[in-house]
Image (tube, rainbow, N blue to C red):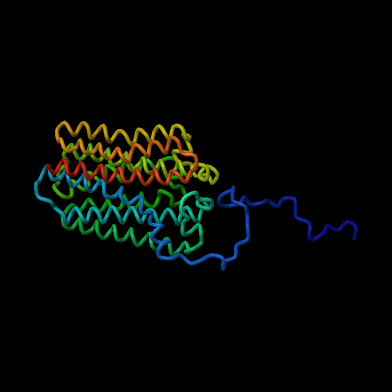
Amino acid sequence: MAGTPSKKRKTAGTKRRPPRGNPQRPHQPRDPRAVTKATAADWIGAARLRTLPLTITPILIGTGAALLVDNALHWVLALLCLAVAVSLQIGVNYANDYSDGIRGTDDNRVGPARLTASRKATPRAVLGVALAFFAIAAVAGLALTIRTQQWWLIAVGAACIVAAWFYTGGKRPYGYAGLGELFVFVFFGLVATVGTTWVQVQAIPQEAWFGAVAAGLLACAVLLANNLRDIDQDRASGKRTLTVLIGRRATRILFTVFVLVPFAIAIFLALFYPIAWLALLALLAALPAILIVWTYRLPSELVVALALTSLTSVAYGAFLFWAFLG
C-alpha cells in the first residue's frame, strides 16, 4: 500500500553507539585462527623485565640505611621486602596488560605487543596471573608482618595492592587522570625505601628519606619515558597521562629534572659518606637516556631510554648501599 512505511526503513530515533577502544584503529574482521597462542617468551615479555630494576633500588637503599642504625644485615627481612616489591611490580604490569587491553588502549602500541591486546592470551588468563603475583606479594608481606610483629603493615600492604590495581583498573583509573607519577613516587619511592628500613630496625634515619626521594624520582622518570613513547596512542584513546596533559616539551624537562635531582642528592650525601661520589658513575647511563628523550625521532627509540633509566636506578641504589655500608 502507498502509505505503508517499509519494514526495512530505520526509525528516526535510532542512535549509533560510539566505537569502543582506540578510535584510530580501523575496523577489520578478525580471524581467530590467525592469532598464535602466547609462548613462554610472550608471558615473560609481558612481565616487562625492563621495569624490574626499579624494585631493587629502594630495597638496596633502604637496607643500606638500616645498616646505619644496626650493623647487622637482616638479610631475611631484606629478601622478603624484595619479594614484595618484585611481585607487586610484575603484578601491576600484568594488571595493566589486562586493563589497557580490554579498554583498547593498547590496540596500536609502539613498544612490544601486549598479551590481551594481541589476543595471544585471554583477558581472564592475564588477570589470573596478575592476581597470582598480587597474592605472592601479600604472602611475603604477611611473613614480614609476623616476623616483625608490626601488624599495621597489613594496612600498608593492602594500600599497595589497591594502588597497583587502580593504576589502570576500575572505572576511574588514576593512571588515566595524570596521577601515575605521584603514586609511583609515593609507593615505589617513599613507601618501598622507608618501609624496607623500618621493618629491619624499627627506625628511619634521614638517609632513608633522601634515598627514598631519589628512588622515587628515578621510577617516575621511567614512567615518563614510557608515556612519552605512547603519547599519541594515549591521546587518541582517551588516556590522559601526565605526558598527555603537559605535552612533549614539558615532559622532556620534567624527565631531565627527575633524573638529575637524585645525583644532586648523592653529592650531598657524599659530604658525609664519601663512597656516595661513585653514584655519579650512574650518569654514564643517565645522560644517554636524557639525550635520547630530547633528540628521538621514532617513539621506539624511547624503549632504550626507558631501559637506560632503569639501569641508572639500580646502579644508583647499589652505590648508595655501598656508601652506607662503608
Residue 28 is situated, as x and y percent measured from the top left of the image, at: 63, 57
- Please state if 163 lies on the left or on the right of 238 as rendered: left
In this rendering, is residue 271 above or below 76?
Answer: above
Compare residues 62 and 183 and report the one nearer the observer. Answer: 62
Q: Residue furthest bottom?
A: 33
User: Do we see residue 124 in this rendering?
Assistant: yes
Q: Residue at x 47, y 52 (%)?
A: 100
User: Do we see residue 187 in this rendering?
Assistant: no
Residue 287 is situated, as x and y percent measured from the top left of the image, at: 34, 36
Residue 262 is situated, as x and y percent measured from the top left of the image, at: 28, 36
Q: Residue furthest left?
A: 71
Q: Residue at x 46, y 50 (%)?
A: 111
Q: Residue furthest right?
A: 2
- Please state if 245 lies on the left or on the right of 6 as rendered: left
In this rendering, is residue 280 above or below 166?
Answer: above
Residue 12 is situated, as x and y percent measured from the top left of the image, at: 75, 50
Q: Quadrant of the N terminus?
A: bottom right
Compare residues 70 and 158 and report the one nearer the observer. Answer: 70
Q: Residue at x 40, y 50 (%)?
A: 166
Q: Quadrant of the C terminus?
A: top left
- Please state if 42 lies on the left or on the right of 134 as rendered: right
Number of labelled discs?
A: 0
Q: Residue at x 33, y 58 (%)?
A: 134
Compare residues 44 and 59 and report the one nearer the observer. Answer: 44
